[in-house]
Image (tube, helix red, strand yellow):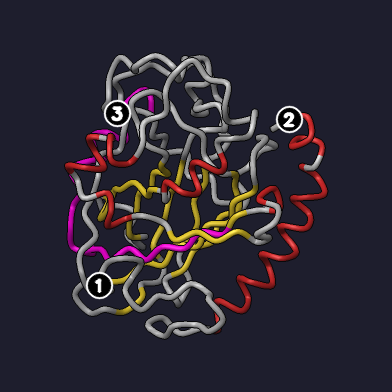
Amino acid sequence: MDVNNLQGKKSSSRRDFLKGSAAITATAALAPIGLARAEGKLSFQNGNGIGVCTLTPEQISGPYFRNSKIVRRDITDSEAGIPFLLKVTIMDEKTCKPVDKLFIDIWHCNSRGKYSGWSYISPDIPPEAGEISGINRTDDKVFLRGAQQSDKNGVVNFTTIYPGFYVGRATHIHIAIRQISKDINEEEHFAFVGQMYFPEEINTEVYKYDLYSKRRVIRTKNREDEYFKNMNGHLSEIKVTKIDESDINRGILGEIILSIDLENISNFITKDDLYSHTV
């Protein structure tokens, strides 16, 4: 696949993508959680592979978290890639009801496997550390990072690009969830920190394009990823569908339901981590 053709289509594809995804999102908002939609649309009946009330397992935050609190839906920042619209629904695993007014961060690498804030670090070389504060930042860029507040249906929608990959890890998007406190003296904490993965079938198709391929490293698949295997990554796999089956460049839709314990205090991003010089 020719990267020039892909990039040349970017502007028109993104316009079509946003128009189409806006209509799809509006329709999806009317579909009650727990009821399957007809005509082969995505279903929330099983919480995307999990029971809606089954606790979604947490995963590590990785070294590239930033507490930037950039509230926005479109996190693309002109990064090139196949358009991707992500819908995340948050459920209370104890009540099986959607949760509103949660502050939800997501972040992921670009098509070449680089994270903003660390974009001068090669994604083809294993990182020096895997935890927050383990790697010094190289820049102040904020592409492919953003946060939103969940609505009354427990939903947030993000417009971004399909993530690339980097050495040793399967394709994923990071997510961190915290409650919004009205008390400024209350210590901030995260109730959930996780990673959302992609089906290998769509990964294989996306990574045929030059924009994502021509790398010096062999891509790690889900079944080869230690975190996916050992931290139940299959329970947080995104359901995906192409907007146009004949042209993946028009964009991909992704949906996932995460069931969390609102009383949990995550060990993967702690209040002390928020004072780290890298965060």
Apparent side of residue 109 relative to residue 186 in the rendered image (left or right): right
Residue type at numbered disc 3? Ile
Relative depth, front residue between 30 and 202: 202
Quadrant in the picture for residue 209: top right
Q: Which mark is residue 25?
A: none
- Residue 267 falls in which quadrant of the image? top left
Residue assigned mark 3: 132
Q: Residues within 10 Å of mark 1 (few under 14, many from 20)?
A: some
Q: Is residue 176 located in the magenta-colored stretch of the structure? A: no
Res. 86 in view = yes
10 Å crowding of disc 3: few (<14), some (14-19), many (20+):
many
274 in the magenta segment: yes
For the N terminus, the image quarter is top right
Residue of label 1: 51
Counting residues from the start of the chain, the first of labels 3 and 2 encountered is 2
* SS at circle 2: loop
Q: Distance from label 2 to label 1 (Cα)?
A: 41 Å
Where residue 8 sits: x, y (%)?
Answer: 82, 36
Give SS at disc 3.
Answer: loop
Q: Position of residue 17 (x, y in %)?
A: 71, 57
Q: Nearer the viewer, mark 2 or mark 1?
A: 2
Q: Position of residue 237 (x, y in %)?
A: 36, 55
Name the residue: 34% across, 16% down.
126
| Residue underneath mark 2 | 2
Residue range corresponding to the magenta coloring? 253-279
Could you tell me if residue 73 is visible in this image? no
Circle nearer the N terminus (2, 1): 2
Label 2 packing within 10 angstroms: few (<14), some (14-19), many (20+): few
For the point 76% across and 35% down, the residue is 7
